[in-house]
Image (cartoon, rainbow, N blue to C red):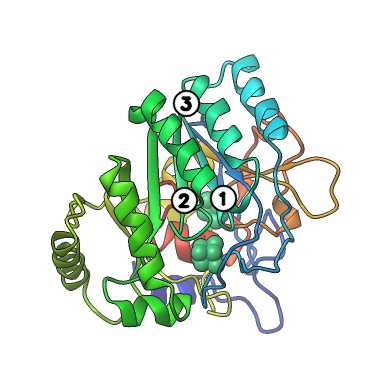
Amino acid sequence: MTLTDLDIMSAPPRGIEKFRDPAFTATGARRASVPFTSLETLWINTGTLCNIACVNCYIESSPTNDRLAYMTASEVVSFLDEITALNLSTTQIGFTGGEPFMNPQFCDMLSDALARGFNVLILTNAMQPLMRAHTMKAMLTLKNLYSAQITVRVSLDHYTKALHEKERGADTWGVALKGLAWLTSNGFELVIAGRTCWGESEEAARAGYARFFEQNEFKIDAFDPASLILFPEMDERADIAEITEACWNLLNKSPGDMMCATSRMVVKRKNANSPTVLPCTLLPYEGQFDMGATLKSAQKTVALNHPHCAKFCVLGGGSCNG
Ligand code: SF4
Ligand code: SF4
């Protein structure tokens, strides 16, 4: 089964839009959905502000985008408490932004999650917000107390300065390298997130990253997909097939493999009184995916009613859980 086959199979009659009805596709077939199985990872979006503005940031972060406001440490604690109260099997709290180290209460959130025994995964660009003296000091304190529980995932869009800066802007390469060097020299567990949009094979990309890691003495295995995650681009404008219930078998995929079977993300929309729970990290602004204000209310089935569900998850095999 190829994308072309699927496109033909689900091509709607002219004039009928795709991704409108959560229950049915434009062709009238039953839309695929993903039942909630367990909460393995809870993502916290710390806020969309970022110190830079990448060309293809999926969440459109920038120094001015505050559509998702800064989460507070006490709001995060209420979700950590709810995990305990509901006796959920959650092992990991993932923190994403924007740039999480921009949030003034971020290290408190880390401390609260770590003290409760969760593993934490921090998605960062490793630039100036991390490299402030008080933040580095707080991170070293947490590292000394909870070393094995902390993983830092740093975005490095390519292993060359030219292509990394094509995505991230001028003067972003050297600063990120400084942050990476600091994290490495202080023994943080590191994962690198790259992109696959540069017209080279995965093999060539991994070999390039391997040379770069070796030159810089970063102890990261570029050939391990869990240590170097290469993400496909997410093109909002691309036409894409809708996923029907029949597609699982045709594609030999399972609903349980989707991020939304085992994850949720908490966001705080600008001017909202309280945070909202969403099924995954990929649809931060889509109101139709809001699942209420608590983890309990978010234990429900997700209809795959967005192009990202098809392109990035079901057909692309991507996952931000890496
Ligand atoms: S560093 Fe990350 S959050 Fe910030 S603009 Fe780039 S991709 Fe978006
Ligand atoms: S984008 Fe992926 S993880 Fe999110 S709801 Fe759709 S299928 Fe699930």
* SS class, disc 1: helix
Q: Left of 187 or right of it: where is 288?
A: right
Write the residue at 49% across / 70% down.
234
Q: Which residue is mark 3?
A: 118
Q: Left of 80 or right of it: where is 290?
A: right
In this rendering, which labeled residue sits more in front, label 1 or label 3?
1
**Do the residues under discs 1 and 3 have CB atoms within 8 angstroms?**
no
Label 1 to label 3, Cα distance in Å? 18 Å
**Do the residues under discs 2 and 3 have CB atoms within 8 angstroms?**
no
User: Pointer 2: residues within 10 angstroms few (<14), some, or many (20+)?
Assistant: many
**Residue type of the residue flagged with mark 3:** Phe
Mark 2 close to ligand 1, CB under 8 Å: yes
Q: Earlier in the sequence, mark 2 or mark 3?
A: 3
Q: Is residue 284 above or below residue 90?
A: below
Q: Which percent across, then down, holds residue 215?
A: 14, 64
**Residue type of the residue flagged with mark 1:** Pro
* SS class, disc 2: strand
User: Pointer 1: residues within 10 angstroms few (<14), some, or many (20+)?
Assistant: many
**Do the residues under discs 1 and 2 have CB atoms within 8 angstroms?**
yes
Q: Which percent across, then down, holds residue 286?
A: 70, 59
Q: Which residue is mark 2?
A: 123
Q: Which residue is mark 1?
A: 100
**Nearer the observer, 191 or 110:** 110
**Residue type of the residue flagged with mark 2:** Leu
